[in-house]
């Protein structure tokens, strides 16, 4: 048609032959999208990356590509420029993250969180691009926190223009709301860090004055010694008055609620030691222990800080969850013309139609009505692989739509959503204390009360023997004992373990669950839907006529394609969609389907129903098969054509899980409402010695009760919906939660990814947790048993007491925080964002 | 040993001075981003192509 024109011209750029996308580094497909930079043509992988790279080059920012040390995030899924940024210009949306710039009219300042900042060149790129926008007064992007502060003139430009410029570069900017819990935690942390710093700094300096006095013995002139004391006093003042404040408030809170907690002896010790030292300085006589006070406060604050950092990491997951839901959604107008409007997610109602673009988060629970895509549900289920979604599939709010535009019908909003349910369950678990923690709390209370009493007695006794030392012995007693292993380390261990479990896809909904799981002796499994997938598959075909296997299967599928029965679906799936069309189809509920296929009147279903057509008995040797598995028969007016055996297959991860549990020395049992033969079959396949089939819910309940009467601690694993009574009877219940039904499940532990392989690891993790708690308690007992008598005997100076107690609390907290490390390697996704 | 009468008070003053300087540095954001500025200095702002 047309002549081929040579493509090479004088200005044709040289070709870059790198294997990956120039912009994002992903492998290139057949179709490439070129971008020219510095006279060299580079290939990008998609239109999105091409547009971003072109924007960067056109703005004269090509230096980004020379300076960067990591590839950019792919623009493939962002689908170019996100729509409707105009919503960010609305005052009600801006309220949380925009404020008026100080000392400037018409100027505003916003905090934004920028996603996709992978190296320092990104910072340069974004700052340069934004600074060149008219009306932008100042830009500062923090590489460490990914937070940008932007000031602009509202008369010249709008926030949406700025956000669009960021989006054009291939980054996502979110409003950063400083009122969030995370921000509060950060501020709390920085105050604690300051207290720690002041105490540490003062401790070092006070030591400088204290050590010479110790070494000199009495060789120092009194006035120099007094000068040292005054200097120490001045430096300890900020520690006693500011750094130690958390202990005072803690002690005051305890006393007001008429309890004695671990802060009471600590605060008492600090106050007595400090005031007595001040008194000694005033009188220029006697011992001073300013060094002990500052060291004690410093080391205790260090333990607190460590515990807080661990807690923050555990809570982080929960924070991420809340952040999953977007602020706005694209709702389809009711007129049906396909136009959309941007609305706040809070104003969505059930039955609204919402469009979700690639890269966008699903705003609420719902069902796909149009479009095909995949969704990333990793933060909801721990499942790292994207899940395919098409019309009719359920969507969970908070999942991320990865590659296609989908329209969804909203089913549940706000507090009814799965995400809200997860957060609620996590809150509940954290608000409950397991028995061991409750016991530790009670013991700690008694311990402190007895300690205060003993201190008073010891003081009185020493007052008789040697009045000068009485006070310091009492202070050493208050300081040296350490109830923190009881009060501090147990909650830290549980929080750490719960957080690590969630990241592996296991949701612990009860505070007592991990403890009981660790003690469990018997694991009882439900079969259908738990050990097996709950989906029927074709296990075998017995041909009874001249028809071939493929023919019979095609005929069966032709009839069953009209049926919604699981067996029917399995047959249609086995025929792989290749089957003729049936006419005159009639479905008889609970019996089967009748219809005309290829001119033959056929029936499929239960053997008696099919036999009505031809009045022949089933060959007798097949009766045993009929017992072993689900079976449907196909026949026409002349006789039987084929028998289809169907089976519910065992989950692929079940055998490994059973082996792991058995290896840990646990007793395993299978309880099924299914026919005994089938229960036996599954039990044999998995190597479970004890099984019971044909059990009614009442049977299951009494069976579990019987086990418990023999002293067993039973963990029941079920699907959480159908076997609720027996789950409730077991000491600890574990349910498999397939995404959207999560809200209806009542169980102590939910395996969220609908996978079994996380179970064995969870059992091990719970045992580790219990072991760590016991280690800590044992240490607390041994330490206090040794330290208390020594202190009473006057053998411990306040300085040694401070070191001993602080070291002990650091030890238990550090031991508890070992549990934060995710132990599930390779089996579950630990995907951090 | 008379010098101690000067040195000890001086050390106390120094401690407070150092603490104050550190407090100012932290408040004014000197430690907020420890990595970015090191790279920023290497990149030219006036590097326009075309």
Image (cartoon, coloured by chain):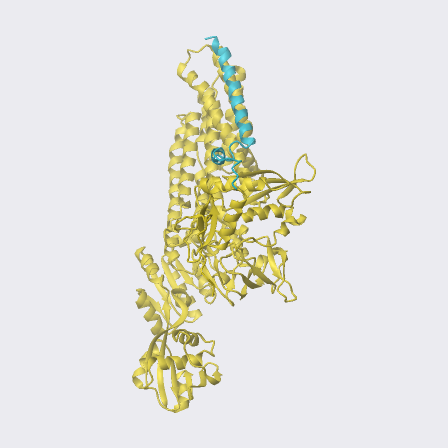
Residue found farthest to the right: A105
Q: Nearer the viewer, residue A606 or A134?
A: A134
What's the colour of chain A in the image?
Answer: yellow
- Residue A289 visible within the image: no
Rendered view: A636 above or below A361: below
What's the colour of chain B in the image?
Answer: cyan
Looking at the image, residue A709 sits to the left or right of residue A431; the answer is left
**Snapshot quadrant of residue A646:** bottom left
Q: How many marks?
A: 0
The x and y percentages for residue A14 are 42, 47
Q: Nearer the viewer, residue A192 or A801?
A: A192
The x and y percentages for residue A191 are 54, 34
**Snapshot quadrant of residue A627:** bottom left
Residue found farthest to the front: A3
Rendered view: A499 above or below A575: above
- Residue A187 visible within the image: yes
Q: Nearer the viewer, residue A459 or A479?
A: A479
**Snapshot quadrant of residue A334:** bottom right
The x and y percentages for residue A724 are 47, 64
Residue found farthest to the top: B2
The x and y percentages for residue A283 are 53, 15
Residue visible at 51% across and 21% down?
Answer: B15
């Amino acid at each position: 048609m047309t002549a081929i024109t040579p493509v090479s011209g004088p200005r044709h750029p040289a070709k870059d032959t790198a294997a990956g996308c120039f912009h994002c580094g992903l492998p290139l497909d057949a179709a490439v999208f070129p971008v020219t930079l510095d006279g060299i043509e580079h290939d990008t992988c998609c239109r999105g990356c091409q547009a971003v790279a072109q924007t960067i080059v056109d703005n004269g920012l090509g230096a980004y590509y020379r300076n960067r040390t990591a590839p950019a995030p792919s623009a493939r899924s962002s689908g170019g420029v996100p729509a409707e940024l105009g919503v960010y210009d609305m005052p009600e949306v801006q309220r949380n993250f925009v404020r008026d710039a100080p000392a400037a009219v018409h100027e505003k300042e916003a905090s934004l969180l920028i996603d996709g900042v992978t190296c320092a060149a990104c910072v340069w790129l974004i700052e340069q691009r934004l600074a060149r926008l008219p009306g932008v007064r100042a830009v500062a992007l923090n590489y460490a926190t990914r937070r940008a502060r932007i000031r602009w003139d509202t008369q010249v430009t709008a926030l949406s223009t700025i956000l669009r410029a960021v989006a054009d570069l291939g980054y996502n900017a979110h409003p950063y709301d400083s009122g969030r819990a995370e921000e509060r935690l950060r501020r709390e942390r920085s105050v604690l860090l300051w207290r720690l710093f002041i105490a540490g700094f003062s401790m070092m300096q006070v030591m400088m004055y204290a050590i010479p006095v110790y070494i000199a013995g009495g060789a120092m002139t009194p006035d120099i010694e007094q000068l040292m004391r005054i200097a120490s006093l001045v430096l300890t003042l900020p520690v006693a008055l500011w750094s130690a404040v958390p202990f005072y408030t803690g002690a005051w809170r305890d006393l007001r609620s008429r309890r004695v907690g671990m802060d009471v002896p600590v605060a008492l010790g600090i106050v007595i030691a400090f005031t007595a030292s001040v008194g000694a300085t005033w009188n220029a006589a006697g011992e001073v222990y300013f060094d002990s006070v500052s060291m004690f406060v410093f080391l205790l604050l260090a333990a607190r800080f460590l515990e807080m950092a661990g807690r923050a990491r555990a809570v982080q997951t929960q924070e991420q969850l809340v952040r999953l839901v977007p602020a706005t959604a694209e709702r389809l107008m009711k007129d049906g013309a396909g136009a959309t409007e941007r609305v706040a997610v809070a104003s969505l109602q059930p039955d609204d139609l919402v469009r979700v673009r690639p890269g966008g988060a699903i705003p609420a629970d719902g069902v796909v009505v149009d479009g095909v895509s995949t969704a990333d549900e990793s933060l909801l289920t721990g499942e790292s692989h994207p899940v395919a979604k098409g019309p009719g599939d359920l969507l969970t709010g908070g999942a991320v739509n990865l590659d296609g535009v989908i329209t969804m019908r909203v089913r549940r909003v706000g507090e009814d959503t799965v995400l809200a349910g997860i957060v609620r369950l996590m809150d509940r678990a954290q608000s409950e204390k397991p028995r061991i923690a409750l016991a530790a709390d009670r013991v700690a209370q008694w311990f402190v009360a007895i300690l205060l009493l003993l201190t008073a007695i010891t003081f009185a006794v020493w007052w008789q023997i040697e009045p000068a030392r009485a006070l310091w012995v009492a202070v050493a007693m208050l300081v040296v004992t350490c109830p923190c292993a009881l009060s501090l380390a147990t909650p830290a261990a549980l929080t750490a373990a719960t957080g690590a479990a969630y990241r592996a896809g296991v949701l612990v909904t009860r505070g007592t669950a991990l403890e009981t799981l660790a003690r469990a002796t018997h694991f009882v499994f439900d079969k259908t839907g738990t050990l097996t997938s709950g989906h029927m598959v074709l296990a075998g075909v017995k041909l009874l006529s001249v028809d071939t296997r493929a023919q019979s299967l095609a005929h069966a599928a032709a009839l069953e394609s009209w049926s919604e029965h699981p067996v029917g679906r399995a047959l249609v799936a086995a025929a792989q969609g290749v089957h003729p069309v049936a006419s005159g189809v009639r479905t008889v509920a609970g019996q089967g389907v009748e219809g005309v296929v290829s001119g033959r009147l056929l029936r499929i279903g239960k053997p008696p129903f099919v036999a009505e057509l031809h009045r022949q008995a089933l060959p007798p040797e097949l009766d045993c098969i009929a017992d072993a598995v689900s079976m449907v028969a196909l026949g026409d007016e002349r006789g039987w054509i084929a028998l289809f055996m169907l089976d519910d297959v065992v989950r692929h991860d079940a055998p490994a899980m059973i082996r792991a549990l058995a290896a840990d020395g646990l007793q395993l049992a299978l309880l099924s409402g299914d026919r005994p033969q089938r229960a036996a079959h599954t039990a044999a396949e998995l190597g479970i010695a004890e099984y019971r089939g044909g059990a009614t819910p009442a049977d299951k309940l009494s069976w579990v009760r019987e086990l418990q009467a023999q002293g067993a601690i039973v963990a029941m694993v079920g699907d959480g919906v159908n076997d609720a009574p027996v789950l409730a009877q077991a000491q600890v219940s574990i349910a498999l939660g397939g995404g959207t039904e999560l809200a209806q499940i009542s169980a102590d532990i939910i395996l969220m990814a609908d996978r079994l392989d996380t179970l064995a690891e969870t059992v091990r993790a719970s045992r580790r947790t219990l072991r760590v708690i016991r280690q800590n308690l044992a240490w607390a007992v041994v330490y206090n048993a040794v330290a208390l008598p020594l202190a009473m005997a006057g053998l411990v100076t306040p300085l040694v007491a401070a070191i001993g107690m602080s070291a002990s609390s650091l030890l238990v907290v550090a031991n508890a925080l070992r549990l934060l490390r995710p132990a599930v390697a390779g089996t579950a996704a630990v995907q951090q964002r | 040993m008379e010098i101690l009468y000067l040195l000890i008070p001086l050390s106390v003053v120094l401690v407070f001075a150092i603490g104050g300087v550190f407090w100012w540095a932290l408040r004014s954001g000197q430690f907020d981003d420890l990595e970015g500025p090191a790279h920023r200095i290497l990149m030219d702002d006036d590097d326009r192509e075309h």
